[in-house]
Amino acid sequence: MCAVTGLDAPEGRDLLINMLASRLPELGNIRRHGRTRPEMLEIVRACLREPGGLPELAATLNDYAPNTVPVLRISELAVTSPVLAVLSEAESREVHSLLSRVRHLDVRGVLYAAAGELTLPDRRVSTLRDAFDFLSQVNARADGLLPVMALVEHVVAALEGDAHRQVADGLRAWNDAQARRLGTGAPLKALRAEIAQAPTAQPAPACLVIQLSRHGMTPDHYLLSHWRQIRPGPWRPERGEDQIVALKDVEATVERLVVRAERDWAGRPGRPVLEFVLPFHLLNHPLEWLPMGSQSSSSTALCLSYPVVLRSLERMRAREFHRRWHNRWQQMTEDAGIVCHWDTTGRRGHDPVQWTSRLTADERLVSVALNAPPLPGPAGSQASLEAALRAGVPLAVWDRRPAPPSEFRKRVKKIIKGKPIELPQRVQQLRNEAATAGAAQREAHAGRHFAVLFDDPNRIVDGSSPGADPGSARGGHDDEGDS
């Protein structure tokens, strides 16, 4: 694209973007850099996010500079064509047989890890054979390694214990044979070293993360930062432009950010999640009930369209607690059930030292249920939540009312029952029940007041905080023309 005559000038790029926007309206908001190569990259990235975006780009370039050598080459690259088969049927059958013996792994997680930057299938991938067959239709990586070989390596790394030793040895031998045949021994060795140092992470959902932190000396003003995860997969959020807002303006700002995020998610099936990274004093604000469509007569609460969870700003910035946080998250996601530590604040015989000591000593306790909102003072459970965060607990639930109702414990047990990773969706269902209840029961329904802190340590976003890892949240500022 950089070689196309005229695109080295800003006015040429302006014309191309305007032509593209007539075919794909979303491309009219492409970020501008004032330099040729970065703007070409922005155009290609935007087209990759749109269904049929690359063919439209090729067609537009052909209108701009018809039948020129660079445009003809771009058309060849953009047109979808079958990938030449590298594996024989016998080789595919051999690895199919080995993979069919592995039934306990998180298939989507392994596929996400192996695929890297590749666009993943919209269809359901339920077995390792499905994942293998999908990657067998994908071009080789930049280092020459077949994506299916990367998948096999991630499966081998996830197989532990003597029970799976034979399968792991067979898969590794299969990969070694392919590397010898294709001359990819060096990149295979490099991938094995990389996997050994960084174990496979759970895929992140498409999501919008909104963070509020105090700004300067003005008590009611906050720095609002946000990140967008465009599609499910490895955690690679794109950071948007920071804004300074008063607390009363958060509602309108969040609505604009959600609308912008939906434009990014358009055309992609899925169920994005909304996360609020908040300082302690804002955790009891019911941000999940912010209205969407506030300019119309039919506005609805945010939590009816999205699972909404809270995260702790203070812990995200306190790296000295992150090891324990990782430990408890791993414990929670690997165990069959979530073990809860019940708060005793406000009850007769409450012993905060004993309660905190028991929580700290037992890493099986991966969640806490607060007996009161996390507010300061003897009537609040702020001290209990602070202790839980220091201990690395990733999940906390409470009722926002001054005292939990009698059915609170029953509700908590129902919410934490099931796969931990699906907990935000179960909470959304409870809130849906509250919103759709009859008028007389709506305000009293537990779902109207149920707060959830669900904090994944693998998804750090606060790259600007003191001591934070600058590589933990990729991307810089992303222009937000409508906010």
Image: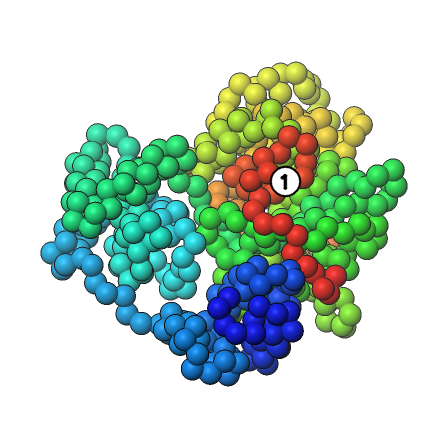
* 120 lies above or below 11: above
Give the residue at x 20% y 50%. Answer: 182
Label 1 crowd (10 A; few <14 / some 14-19 / many >=20): some
* 8 lies above or below 214: below
Q: Is residue 44 visible?
A: yes
Depth check, front residue: 45 or 357:
45
Quadrant where the C terminus sits is bottom right
Give the residue at x 31% y 60%. Answer: 139
- Most extreme residue toward the left is 90
* 404 lies above or below 268: above
Give the residue at x 54% y 64%. Answer: 40
In-image side of 108 versus 39 (left or right): left
What kind of residue is marked 1?
A: Gly
What colour scheme has been applied to the protein in the rendered image? rainbow
Depth check, front residue: 3 or 275:
3
In-image side of 77 versus 261 (left or right): left
Mark 1 — residue?
463
- Most extreme residue toward the right is 218
Q: How far from the left and from the top, in percent, is residue 374? A: 72, 34
Q: Is residue 388 visible?
A: no
In-image side of 71 versus 10 (left or right): left
Q: How far from the left and from the top, in percent, is residue 68? A: 44, 79
The quarter of the picture where residue 353 lies is top right
Q: How far from the left and from the top, in percent, is residue 140? A: 30, 56
* 142 lies above or below 267: above
